[in-house]
């Protein structure tokens, strides 16, 4: 177990997490359907996102929510995503940055779930 300190740690966090996601029966097929053969591009985007969030190096540009807005997901999917994310952090990392990653992931999952439900309930698509 180590602290998240640099881009190599971020890459380990992201790569090991998405390896779990891709093997998961509930959310894996959704990710594979959306991402298809663009996994290297997606992983690179996730490296920059988490590097910006956890290491304060502004390498991510964009808005994380729009690609998720039309996904066929609900609370159950976000709960599984969060479960896998936290399990993965517990397997590899400890410390302040890991705690921040837990907190931010939970906030993101809740916010994305809320926004997707709001869009659906108000027929915004």
Image (tube, grey):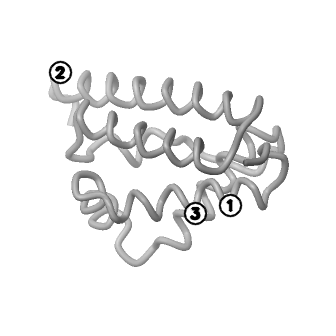
Residue mark closest to the camera, 2 vs 3: 3
Image spot of residue 66 (x, y percent): 42, 42
Residue 38 sits in quarter? bottom left
Q: Residues within 10 Å of mark 2 (few under 14, many from 20)?
A: few
Q: CA distance from mark 2 to mark 3?
A: 36 Å
Residue 79 sits in quarter? top left
Which residue is most to the bottom? Answer: 37
Q: Which mark is residue 122?
A: 2
Secondary structure beneath disc 2? loop
Nearest to the observer: residue 90 or residue 96: 90
Callouts 2 and 3 close, C-beta under 8 Å: no
- What residue is drawn where x is 62% and y is 64%? 44
Which of marks 1 and 2 precedes in the sequence?
1
Q: Quick check: 124 above or below 37?
A: above
Image spot of residue 61 (x, y percent): 67, 48
Secondary structure beneath disc 1? helix
Q: Which residue is mark 1?
A: 11
Nearest to the observer: residue 14 or residue 117: 14
Q: Which residue is mark 3?
A: 15
Q: CA distance from mark 2 to mark 1?
A: 38 Å
- What residue is drawn where x is 27% and y is 66%? 33
């Amino acid at each position: 177990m180590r602290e998240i300190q640099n881009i190599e740690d971020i890459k380990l966090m992201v790569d090991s997490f998405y390896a779990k996601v891709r093997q998961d029966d509930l959310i894996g097929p959704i990710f594979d359907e959306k991402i298809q053969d663009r996994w290297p591009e997606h992983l690179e985007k996730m490296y920059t996102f988490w590097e910006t969030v956890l290491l304060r190096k502004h390498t991510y540009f964009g808005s994380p929510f729009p690609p998720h807005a039309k996904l066929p997901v609900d609370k159950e999917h976000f709960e599984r995503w969060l479960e896998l994310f936290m399990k993965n952090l517990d397997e590899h990392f400890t410390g302040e940055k890991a705690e921040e990653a837990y907190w931010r992931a939970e906030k993101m999952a809740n916010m994305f779930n809320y926004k997707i439900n709001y869009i659906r309930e108000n027929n915004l698509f």
